[in-house]
Amino acid sequence: MFSHIMVGADDTAAAKGFYDATLGTLGIEPGFIDDKGRVFYRTNTGVFGVTKPIDGKGATHANGGTIGFNAQSTEQCDAWHTAGLQNGGENIEAPPGIRESGQMKMYIAYLRDPAGNKICALYRMPTE
């Protein structure tokens, strides 16, 4: 459904350090910086990028928006969360844990990145 997701950050070096650490816990290679100073993380399922806003104004985060990254286990979610806290992220919402919605059971960890973007790691737990 998505080709890519791009978020804004005024300090792309800090963003790269944060996302290299958090996405690294999910098995994603460190990001690369292109000739325009943007940071990109490429996988077989899509691209995640960080850039200074093109209009030259300060970066802002989406109010009500969340970007979720797939995790393969609860342990991976916890490692992602810890790496984020150790690299400038802010803990938000409930602590990492199980959330249920109808038949679906998920383990979710939420953070705000150094630029204020709301992100999460999500593991869809097997149904019993």
Image (spheres, helix red, strand yellow):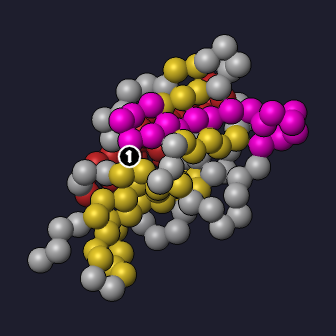
* Residue 47 shown in magenta: yes
The residue indicated by pointer 1 is 80
* Residue 21 shown in magenta: no
Please indicate whether residue 127 sits to the left or right of residue 29 in the image: left
Q: Residues within 10 Å of mark 1 (few under 14, many from 20)?
A: many
Instruction: Locate residue 121, reporting x and y percent.
Output: 40, 54
Please indicate whether residue 45 sits to the left or right of residue 51 in the image: left
Q: Which residues are magenta?
A: 42-59
Quadrant location of residue 11? Answer: top right
Query: Residue 25, can we see it?
Result: no
Establish if 104 lies above or below 60.
below
Q: Residue at x 50, y 49 (%)?
A: 2
Establish if 125 lies above or below 31.
below
User: As shown in the figure, which amino acid type bears the numbered disc 1?
Assistant: Trp
Q: Quadrant of the image for the C terminus?
A: bottom left
Which residue occupies the foreground of this view, 106 or 98? 106
